[in-house]
Image (tube, rainbow, N blue to C red):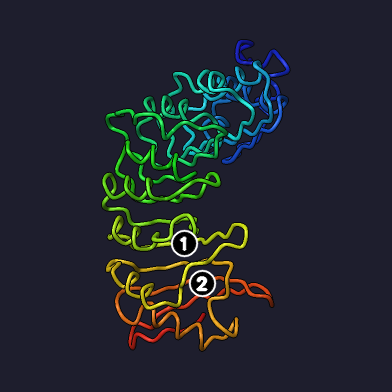
């Protein structure tokens, strides 16, 4: 006879036992949150099978935030956590992340207060990838970077000024940065990377020639060990674009001796006529006539539409061919 102590007694327990195993769980409302709180409490097999947990709420109540904290405190085997929770104050964000220790967590993507995220990092120094969102009136640039012994961050993604703040805490290998407002500039970020992450191998940047006219020269000087560079050019209010066809551009790109892959997206026509493979090959060959760059991905716009092509270098003769 089954031990009555092992039998489910409440509706929450019964529902928890019926939930199927899922490696990815996305919770968007209080009913789902209540269900998975029961799962975390009564069904360890399902709870421990969850690798990625996504929590997405808009203007959550105090009770919802408390229930979210309770769930997170029980999900100690997840390796990926997405917290897309809008309209929360810094105090609410700090309470949500307070004292959480997730020893298997490898990636955190969050829209919460960056100050609260820093406190979370102090309890989860093993985290390797951090994706942060734009925060209204963020004061990252005004705060001194905290010292977090043992922090192992290797990849950062988010607004450039905030990425610069977090990059001061650890030696970073991979960075993806974008402009956060109309006055943003990449100068601070690139200076920080030159000092704190000299071995950076991957860099993806939003750029605007009017905000950062010498951005390519600064990238070359600050991050000389890049193996992959991606530049996404933005144009605001009919501003100028970077002179991609100039000899100076070719000289700057040739200084990145360890570069293997280059990606460029621009709103301007790179070649004329647009989409002409001969003209594209001539431009790519001018950028990288020799060296170890073996792939170039370009996308651009013209009046006739959008164009994209991927060029690879043949190993046996060094010729560029379009895939």
Where does the image place residue 25, in percent across and percent down from the top left?
Answer: 61, 37
Where does the image place residue 195, in percent across and percent down from the top left?
Answer: 26, 46
Given the current orientation, which residue lies at the most extreme top position? 5
The part of the image, by quadrant, that contains residue 33 is top right
Where does the image place residue 258, in percent across and percent down from the top left?
Answer: 28, 66
On screen, residue 120 versus residue 60, left or right, reads left
Q: Which residue is drawn at 65% across and 20% down?
A: 64
Q: Which residue is drawn at 51% across and 72% down?
A: 298
CB-based contact (under 8 Å), mark 1 and mark 2: no
On screen, residue 283 versus residue 300, left or right, reads left
Q: Residue at x 32, y 53 (%)?
A: 200
Q: Mark 2: few, some, or many residues within 10 Å (few <14, many ≥20)?
A: many
* Picture mark count: 2
Q: Mark 1: few, some, or many residues within 10 Å (few <14, many ≥20)?
A: some
| Mark number displayed over residue 251 | none
Q: Is mark 1 on a helix, strand or loop?
A: strand
Q: Which residue is nearer to you in this view: 160 or 215?
A: 215
Q: Is residue 321 above or below residue 142?
A: below
Q: What element carries label 2?
A: strand
Q: In this view, does 119 lie above or below 271?
A: above
Where does the image place residue 36, in percent across and percent down from the top left?
Answer: 63, 26
Gap between marks 1 and 2 measured at Cα: 10 Å
Q: Is residue 319 above or below residue 214?
A: below
Disc 1: which residue? 231
Q: Of marks 1 and 2, which one's residue comes earlier in the chain? A: 1
Disc 2: which residue? 298
Q: Split into 4 quadrants, where in the image is the N terminus?
A: top right
Q: Which residue is nearer to you in this view: 25 or 178?
A: 178
Q: Which residue is nearer to you in this view: 120 or 304?
A: 304
Q: Residue at x 27, y 29 (%)?
A: 149
The part of the image, by quadrant, that contains residue 62 is top right
């Amino acid at each position: 006879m089954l031990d009555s102590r092992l039998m489910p007694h409440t509706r929450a327990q019964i529902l928890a036992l019926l939930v199927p195993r899922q490696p990815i769980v996305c919770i968007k409302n209080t009913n789902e949150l209540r269900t998975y709180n029961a799962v975390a409490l009564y069904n360890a097999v399902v709870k421990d099978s969850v690798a990625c947990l996504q929590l997405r709420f808009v203007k959550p109540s105090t009770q919802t935030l408390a229930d979210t904290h309770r769930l997170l405190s029980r999900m100690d085997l997840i390796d990926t956590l997405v917290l897309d929770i809008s309209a929360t104050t810094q105090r609410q964000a700090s309470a949500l992340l307070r004292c959480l220790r997730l020893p298997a967590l490898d990636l955190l993507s969050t829209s919460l207060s960056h100050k609260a995220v820093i406190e979370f990092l102090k309890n989860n120094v093993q985290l390797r990838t951090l994706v942060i969102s734009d925060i209204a009136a963020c004061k990252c640039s005004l705060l001194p970077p905290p010292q977090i012994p043992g922090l192992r961050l290797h990849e950062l993604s988010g607004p450039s000024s905030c990425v610069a703040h977090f990059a001061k805490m650890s030696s970073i290998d991979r960075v993806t940065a974008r402009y956060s407002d109309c006055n943003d500039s990449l100068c601070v970020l690139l200076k920080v990377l030159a000092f704190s992450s000299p071995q950076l191998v991957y860099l993806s940047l939003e750029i605007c020639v009017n905000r950062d006219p010498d951005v390519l020269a600064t990238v070359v000087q600050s991050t000389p060990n890049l193996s992959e560079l991606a530049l996404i050019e933005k144009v605001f209010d009919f501003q100028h674009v970077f002179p991609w066809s100039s000899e100076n551009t070719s000289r700057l790109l040739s200084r990145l001796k360890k570069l293997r892959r280059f990606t460029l997206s621009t709103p301007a026509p790179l070649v004329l006529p647009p989409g002409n493979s001969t003209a594209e090959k001539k431009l790519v060959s001018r950028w990288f006539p020799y060296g170890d760059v073996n792939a170039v991905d370009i996308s651009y716009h013209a009046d006739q539409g959008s164009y994209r092509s991927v060029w690879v270098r043949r190993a046996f003769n060094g010729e560029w061919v379009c895939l």
